Image: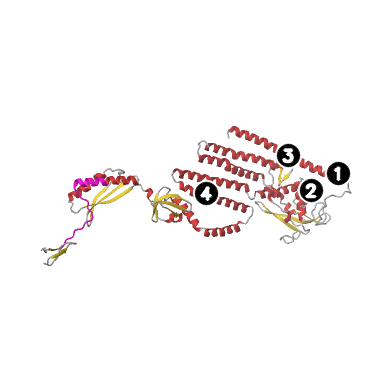
């Protein structure tokens, strides 16, 4: 999206927004006019046809008859809300006990009713089913018999009880009104929960229509905040996505999609949430927002996107380094982390809406223990797979020796590792055993070392022995596969039972086994040729037997299938 596209989108949004404002204002005005026309029509109909009975029967009166249904607490509260939400604050004042108030307050009945309605909309949700429908009210609520409590509103300086009180009417009949003790605190509560001067002015400019506890001007401000929050989320995420797309790599493109998708929506919802609290959410809207459903969904979506992005980047690096087998192990780990994020988001949402998650967590704990016990071998192998992934003792294609098995790694799975033995057979070893066993990784050796012994006969003179060592060192000088850090070695090392031993040691780089074997063959042939030229004889297992006796008698020796020989004694 370029700058021109953003301007065009913003212009379309402003046009749609202004249209919504006009429609909402018109609806509010029409509803008010219809309500007034309906009232006038009803009055005129009643005057014209006084004897006509209404089609709908009125519910029976629970308390004393009263023109404003103030005989019981429930109908009194209901009448107050109906009057104030219809904008009839003169009638709303009839439900307030204006007696014994500070000087001047009793003459402000309609204004106090308006302020009290704003306070209740912003701070309390009153369920009428919990309000008493008895003329005597609740008798066991800890309050005096003539008083009922609906709730409490806490301000920075004090806590105000919202009370209903049984007060006498002018004719002496007791009715229910909001207590003068509560009414006296309306200005104090309005200072913290009422409208600000701009909001007061705006509320008087637009129709006084209420939906979900918000007046028309509040819905207008809400629409404005929707647009401002979207622009506030759009501009930085669009710019960040533009920078990331300048280099066409898969990881950067995935990051750009993450920022311009779930991150943008999350920022938009957070800004919109701040705007709602700036307007002042009503009790019904606050109840709807209590769970934080949309924000939790957006946050979960963003968290899963970040996890997937991190694992994808990790997989790319492992693929470049030749660790393709680790990618297989990463997939279930990524799924487990994503499931954990979703479960935590659901638990947070349940906790926000008032669900007691302690019981659920206890049940999950017991179920988790049972599953862990049933699948402990599988879990051991899976954990072993993770340890192999982290420790990296071997990888596919390398030759290893473990528990007497010598072979090439063919596959590293979630449960086991498969080896192709040098005999051609395939063996499978659980990853739990692979993680705790001693592994000899032949595939990672930097060189092949040859340590051999060359034996020559005992009758070889010292000069020939020295010449034999010189010949070997000459043959191995700057040999194939040698590096300066590992020069060849040759020594007359020891006297054996049947030979003189020459120790030969050299290293072959790189660790190419078949190249090493070919080079060793050449070295062996050269040693044989040079030793023959010098007349140096190789020793082989031999033994010499000396016959001797102490007696002067001749020694009798019988050869197999031959005559008996008599040997004179040696003195």
> Could you say where residue 212 lies in the image, as x and y percent from the top left?
71, 47
Residue 44: mark = 1
Q: Is residue 494 magenta?
A: no
Circle 2 residue: 91
Q: Which one is in front, 176 or 492? A: 492
**Vertical placement of 169 versus 322: above or below?**
below
> Could you say where residue 129 lies in the image, as x and y percent from the top left?
73, 55
**For numbered disc 3, what is the local secondary structure?**
helix
**Residue segment shown in magenta:** 524-547
Residue 25: mark = 3
- CA gap between label 2 and label 4 equals 63 Å
- CA gap between label 1 and label 2 equals 21 Å
Residue at x-position 53% and y-position 47%: 307
Horizontal side, residue 72 vs residue 355: left or right: right
- CA gap between label 4 and label 1 equals 72 Å
Labels 2, 3: front one: 3
Which is nearer the N-term, disc 1 or disc 2?
A: 1
Which is nearer the N-term, disc 2 or disc 4?
A: 2
Which is nearer the N-term, disc 3 or disc 1?
A: 3
Labels 4, 1: front one: 4
Badge 2 vs badge 4, beta-carbon distance below 8 Å: no
> Could you say where residue 463 lies in the image, as x and y percent from the top left?
17, 49
């Amino acid at each position: 999206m370029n700058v021109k596209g953003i301007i065009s989108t913003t212009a379309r949004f402003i046009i749609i927004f202004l249209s919504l404002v006009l429609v909402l204002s018109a609806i509010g005005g029409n509803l008010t006019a219809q309500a007034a026309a309906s009232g006038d029509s009803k009055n005129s109909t009643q005057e014209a046809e006084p004897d006509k009975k209404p089609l709908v029967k009125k519910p029976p009166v629970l308390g004393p008859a009263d023109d404003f249904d103030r005989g019981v607490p429930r109908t009194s509260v209901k009448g107050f809300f109906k009057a104030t939400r219809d904008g009839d604050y003169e009638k709303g004042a009839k439900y307030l006990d204006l007696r014994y108030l500070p000087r001047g307050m009793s003459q402000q009945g309609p204004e106090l009713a308006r302020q009290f309605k704003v306070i209740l909309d912003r701070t309390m949700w009153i369920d009428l089913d919990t309000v008493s429908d008895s003329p005597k009210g609740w008798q066991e609520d800890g309050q005096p018999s003539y008083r009922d409590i609906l709730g409490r509103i806490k301000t920075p300086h004090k806590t105000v009880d919202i009370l209903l009180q049984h007060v006498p009417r002018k004719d002496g009949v007791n009715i229910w009104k909001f207590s003068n003790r509560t009414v006296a605190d309306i200005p104090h509560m309005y200072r913290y929960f009422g409208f600000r001067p701009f909001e007061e002015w705006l509320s008087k400019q637009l129709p006084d229509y209420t939906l979900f506890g918000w007046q028309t001007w509040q819905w207008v401000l809400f629409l404005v905040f929707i647009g401002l929050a979207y622009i506030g989320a759009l501009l930085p995420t669009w710019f960040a996505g533009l920078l990331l797309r300048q280099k066409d790599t898969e990881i950067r493109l995935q990051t750009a999609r993450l920022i311009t998708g779930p991150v943008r929506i999350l920022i938009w919802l957070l800004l919109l949430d701040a705007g709602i609290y700036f307007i002042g959410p009503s009790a019904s809207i606050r109840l709807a927002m209590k769970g934080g459903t949309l924000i939790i969904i957006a946050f979960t979506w963003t968290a899963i996107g970040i996890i997937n992005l991190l694992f994808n980047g990790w997989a790319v690096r492992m693929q470049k380094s030749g660790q393709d087998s680790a990618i297989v192990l990463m997939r279930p780990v990524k799924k487990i982390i994503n499931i954990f994020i979703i479960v935590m988001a659901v638990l947070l949402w349940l906790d926000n809406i008032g669900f007691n998650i302690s019981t659920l967590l206890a049940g999950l704990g017991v179920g988790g223990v049972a599953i862990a016990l049933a699948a402990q071998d599988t879990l051991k192998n899976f954990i072993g797979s993770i340890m192999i992934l982290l420790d990296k003792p071997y990888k596919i294609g390398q030759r290893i020796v473990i528990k007497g098995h010598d072979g090439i790694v063919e596959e590293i799975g979630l449960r086991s590792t498969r080896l192709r033995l040098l005999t051609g057979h395939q063996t499978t070893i659980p990853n739990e055993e692979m993680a705790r066993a001693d592994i000899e990784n032949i595939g990672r050796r930097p060189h092949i070392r040859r340590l051999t012994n060359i034996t020559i006969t005992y009758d070889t003179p010292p000069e020939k022995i020295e010449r034999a060592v010189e010949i070997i060192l000459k043959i191995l000088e700057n040999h194939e596969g040698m590096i300066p850090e590992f020069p060849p070695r040759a020594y007359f090392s020891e006297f054996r039972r049947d030979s003189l031993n020459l120790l030969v040691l050299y290293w072959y780089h790189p660790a190419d086994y078949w190249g090493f074997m070919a080079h060793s063959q050449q070295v062996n042939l050269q040693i044989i040729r040079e030793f023959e030229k010098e007349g140096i004889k190789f020793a082989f297992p031999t033994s010499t037997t000396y016959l001797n006796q102490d007696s002067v008698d001749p020694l009798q020796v019988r050869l197999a299938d031959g005559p008996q020989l008599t040997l004179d004694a040696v003195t």
